[in-house]
Amino acid sequence: MLVIQNERLLGLLKPDYSIGDIYALLERLNQHGTFEFSALPNGLFPAAMLTDDTAYTGYANVWVRDNIHVAYAHYVIGETDVAVKTVQTLLRYFTQHRDRFDAIIQGQADPNVVMNRPHIRFNGQTLEENEEKWPQAQNDALGYFLWLYCLLVRDDLITPAIEEVSTLALFPFYFQAIEYWRDEDSGHWEETRKVEASSIGAVTAGLKVLRQVHLKPAFVNHCCQYRGQLVTLSLLDNLIAKGEQTLNAILPAECVQPAPDKNRPYDGALLFLIYPLEVVKGAIADQILDNVLTHLTRDVGICRYLGDSFWCADYKQKLSGELRTADFSDNMALRDQLLQPGEEAQWCIFDPIVSVIFGQKYQATQQPIDLQQQIHHLNRALGHVTGVDSEFGGFRCPELYHLENNRYTPSDATPLLWTQATLRIALEMMMHTLTAMNKNSV
Amino acid sequence: MKAHWVRAVVLLFFWMCLFQGGENSYAAPEQAVAWVGNMYPSGLSNNILSLGKSFTVYTQVYEPMVTDFSGRGENISCTLYWGEVDRFGGDWNQVHVTPMTYSGDIGYNDEYGVTVTPETGLYEFTTRCSSQKPALVRWQNEGNGRLVVSPLPDAPTDRRAIWVNARTIAWNQPAATFYELHYATDGNLLVPVRQGEGIPLTLQQSLNWYSYPKFPYLNGYDAWRLPSAAVAAIPEILRSEVAIAAYDASGKLMDATGVQLQGVLDDLYSYDGELGVIYNNGTPTLKLWAPTAQSVVLRRFDDANPATSVKIEPMQFDSNTGVWSIEGNSSWDKQYYQYEVEVYTPTTRRIETNLVTDPYSVGLSTNSRLSQIVDLENDPSLKPEDWDNFEKPPFTVPEDMAIYEVHVRDFSRDDQSVPAEHRGLFKAFTYNGLNDKPMSDGMRHLMNLAKAGLTHIHLLPVFDFASVEESVDTRIDPNARVLASFAADTVQQQAIIGSIRGADSFNWGYDPYHYGVPEGSYSTEPRDQTRIIEFREMVQALNQSGLRVVLDMVYNHTFANGLYTQAVLDKVVPGYYHRYTREGYPHSSSCCADTAVEFDMMQKLMVDTMMRWIKAYKIDAFRFDLMNLLTAQRMIELKEKVQSLTVEQDGVDGESIYIYGEGWDFGSARDNGFYHANQYNMAGTGVGTFNDKIRDALHGGYAGDFPNSHRQGFINGLAYDWNGYFYNERFRNDLRTLTDRLRINLAGSLQTYKILDQNGHYTEGRSLNGAGYTRDPQETVNYLSKHDNETLYDLNLFKMPLGESGMAVTSMIERVRSQNMGLSLVGLSQGIPFFHMGSDMLRSKSLDRNSYDSGDWFNRVDFTYQDNNFGVGLPPAWSNQSRWSEMAPLLVNPSLKPDQHDILASVHHLQEILKIRQSSKLFRLETATDIKSRVHFHNTGPNQKDGLIVMSISDDRLPKLDPNYKEIIAIFNASKSTQNWSMPSLRGANVSLHPVQAESYDEAVRMASFTPETGEFHVPSRTTAVFVVTE
């Protein structure tokens, strides 16, 4: 079923698009500010655009992961200067707090104390860490950063200075120190720590691009030593191999640890390993995609995983404001008890990614069904855009829809910049598909 | 050459006479050539030429030593003389002299020719040749040729004029000056090219839509009035070939056309008395309405043997009524007859002598060759035991009806529990466990349904139809064992059936031959009155089984018209009983020529034969095939006539007879400007119409070929379980739009029932794309499948996802539940539910979408519930070949073949739904007011849950309709997941699953529940759950 929240978009949604149709959609959405990414002066993006009523969410903070997705969207649509500014500020942040890396690499801090980890959620205005307890062990976020930063270096959009390269050099040694391939982290969803494929995959992706730029002379000239240890290709290859070896053992699941609160056969986060990280391809990618479509896809959006109690039905009635986005990572059962099966929140960040994945498949296979699916998931994603009577205003991209008084309603993190970013990418990739089709037909 | 000289002498005399009138000095004699003659066309010949065509005249000339050599003789010239006349033999008005040219040698003669193109008129012509050396001239001497040049050289083939009453003819030919009516009693009419020979007509008025109710389409036509002097001739004219002609100011023919006579025949001869065989104390009188016939003769036979000699009896004509009659004697009883009708026939434009059966036949011989004289009303030998006194099942109101559509042959042809000699026949219905008869599997099925709440059996056509050979000895049926030996996706089965389908035992029977006689192929003996007795036995047995009987009548068309073998009406009064275009050709809105009930005697035939079925055969209801080809006015008159019947006077309570039909929006009645009997025009009349709104909302509709065949509806996944087609209908608002319409349908499809629609507006049913069209619940016959198109099971094979291209895979359990969901929604809608036989058995026709002539094989029904007939071969090419490639993989897929458990799940489901419907009057509300005040929908508006309909019916007002329940809540969860619905008003209330469902055959239904603490209902996926609220 295609659920279209904003009926004013109905006339623009089609089973077959032309390039002109996509332009029309972009024009309509841009007219209404759907793709406004209000950055801080330093180029970082708060997670969501908040009002006084929704400030409790804490989404005014900066998440490394979200910033990478937003920056990457700008990279995809050609606004590379925005992407560069974001990752350079993030690098500055990591440089500013490199002691977190040092302490763990040198064994001076216990990585199991998550606040000892490099913080992936912080105050974007000041680049200061928050004191608030938070599940900071999120290797995927570091992986994402490494991946995009190196991507921009690879594309000569960034030429790192010596100090910057030395900060980058921290990452492989840090990943080595925590043994990322078997490190339990809180990952994309900031919840129970476990060995998660989506985190391992993100780190692997970062390391792989680092390996690519490692071959660039300008980079090698500054690189490769941390306190006397060299970042060699063999070090990187070894780390990558360990990551891939673990991925092979876990995928297409997210976590195969036997503990019930950790074991997870399906997870939407794995989609990101297919796109944009591109560390999973072929049959295993197809299996991940199939799992998501079969087990997690709902009428409105796509669930993060089965049993996800975040923004379960009537969430706002069941939890006070401060608890809604609180850290439950140490005791998820407290929140999980609120969930009725089948009432998981349906997220908006996945359909655009699924659309892009199908678009890539179509470009590889030319199978009409892949194009059809690319369009369908793009339309689903467009269906998430809020209606004009929404309490958050019309033409906004929510984080998710959850059941509130039996109606699927956006969560308070609306608009969420991560969703905006993925939707914008999906539209751009639809355009790429159509352009390629036109070329082929010529 | 002597002959030439003789002719020359004669010519000398003739040329003196040639141009009568004295002014023709141009014929002054010259020196004559030896001979001129052999004019072609010859002298005194009558020639008719179409206006605009060319006319060529040849002549030959002989001059010794000149023409008898090869090639053109020197110094000879020939000329055509031609001129227009007012009458042949009269003066030439002017003379045209046209030189002729040499065209060749004919023996010793030279031949000359010339071509001319005259205007409309009468002409004479002759030829003359002359030579210079010596100067001689000769005229051909065989008399002048005659030529008629006419815009209508033959009698008109069209009939664009309408004789609307005795003195008025309508025609839209305004360009002329003079108008005349012409006729020829011998059927050889040539419309004169000069004005003055016909009956002059005068312009009376210009017509509008309302001038003549039987002819609304004459709007804008001119009305032409016959003079008083012609009135006496009208009966003779009506027995003749007739044309109306238009002449210009010079009196020349401009246009002419034939005349449609129905209006004047109704005006002069409309007859309200009895027709057919009328008994008076054992003496039969035969009456035939045939006002245009020149003669009618009775041909009487002692028996039906074709070798039996005929007795010819003249019949008397009543010029006041147009009825031919003859009184017989008691010895004629059970004898056979036909009429010999001599009548002008427009289709052949000649007087024909037709041998024809009686349109009012009461009995027939095999294959309807002869009519039979029987006393249907009084002859005890035609009645089963206790026929006059047995009690019919009680009837209350139409809203209490529930109908099951049965084909006589399908019902028992393969029922092994019926004796072989009675399978497929009327007799099979008598195996009902009563009257010392065993119970057949089929009758057990029907009686179980009857116990559950079914009230009526609707029989596909059982009147005499033309498309099945009635003699068993002459039929050819395929060997089922041979057919069974072929694979599920092969063409052999249908190929074998196709090769013999013209001679096999099966047809639906929508091919009317005689409207008032039971079909012979359904009786054990078609040659005599046995069919009457066995038909009555069937009705009696069904009535005794608790079921009333509906006949499917096909008054909208006849199988044949004109002079085709199986035509009847057109052989008696040609051109009367059918509806014609403005040009005078038959309308064929369906397979065949449409009838025209707007005319009195067609309406009378319909009414009279219906009365016969009601009174003589105790039929309880009628279904009208393509009722929309009839007029709303005539249907209302018919209903009033039926309702006027009383037990005291007629032995029948007319109020207990229900009438319904197909009220679609197409066809000749509409095109001819009538208020045709479609759904909207019948609203408020109490006549029911098949409700395609609920049908299409439920399953997505029948739309023919790929990809339209994949369009989905509420029960099979629209939007919520996409099958890969029609992406534009995959949106939630599509499902909600459809669900809103379906809510209206559940509320009796009332025009004025209001719901809160998906946009948050209170909207009436008529505004929801016409979903609401009735004014009373008895006007909707709710259904989702019937004999037409695919069975519901087959239809869903195209509509539910098959796992292709990443779509879901539909399990057999889901298929069964989807089918059952459809049955539930029909069964629990306000109005009259109608079910196709086998729709409760997952019946398949192996994907056949039009099994009217697909033989027994594709139409089989198994009342042991072991097989649903899916996968028995590719369905017949003549209706399905375009989809074979799509069908073949389905037919061989074993997962699409249900087993007995699956079939039983559906069998039990319908019975449960009928029981539920029967359990409370709240499901059978009788007025729009009641429905509006008692039926409410929850889960509506912009925040509704998808695929979920929650309907409550309350008994919270007077009069109390249900002694047991104060409210009923029916929840239809079509979605693929369990859905909950909370009704806070019911917190703490005494709510339980309906007792029938608490004991349901379906485990999932039993799992439906209500939580009193929260007022929340829980209904499993694809499940209908009915909850009752008690005090």
Image (cartoon, coloured by chain):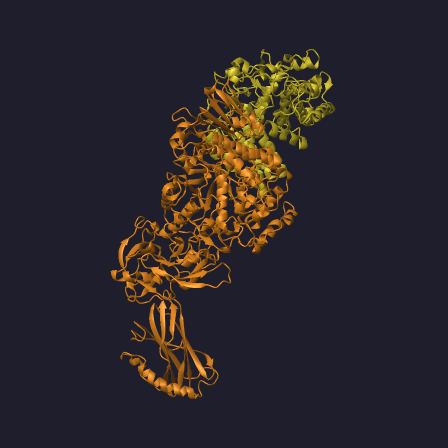
Marks counted in the figure total: 0
Q: Quadrant of the C terminus of chain A?
A: top right
Q: Residue furthest left?
A: B228
Q: Is A140 on the left-hand or right-hand side of A126?
A: right
Decide: is B486 above or below A396.
below
Nearest the viewer among B412 and A147 is: B412
User: Where B74 sits versus B650, above or below?
Assistant: below
Query: Hey, which quadrant is residue B757 in on the image?
Result: top left
Chain painted orange:
B
**Who is closer to the viewer here, B597 or B40?**
B597
Q: Is residue B206 something one can see in this rendering?
A: yes
- The x, y position of residue A396, in whole percent, is 49, 25
Residue drawn 73% across the image and 18% down it: A229
Side of B221 relative to B628 (left or right): left
Q: Is residue B293 above or below residue B596?
A: below
Q: Which tint was used for chain A?
A: yellow
| Horizontal side of residue B414 vs B937, given as left or right | right
- In this view, the residue in front, B315 or A200, is B315
Residue B158 drawn at (x, y percent) = 39, 59
Residue B138 spot, x, y in % from top left: 37, 84
Q: Position of residue B40 (x, y in %)?
A: 41, 77
Is residue A15 visible to the viewer in this orientation of the structure? no
Q: Quick check: B718 above or below B591?
A: above
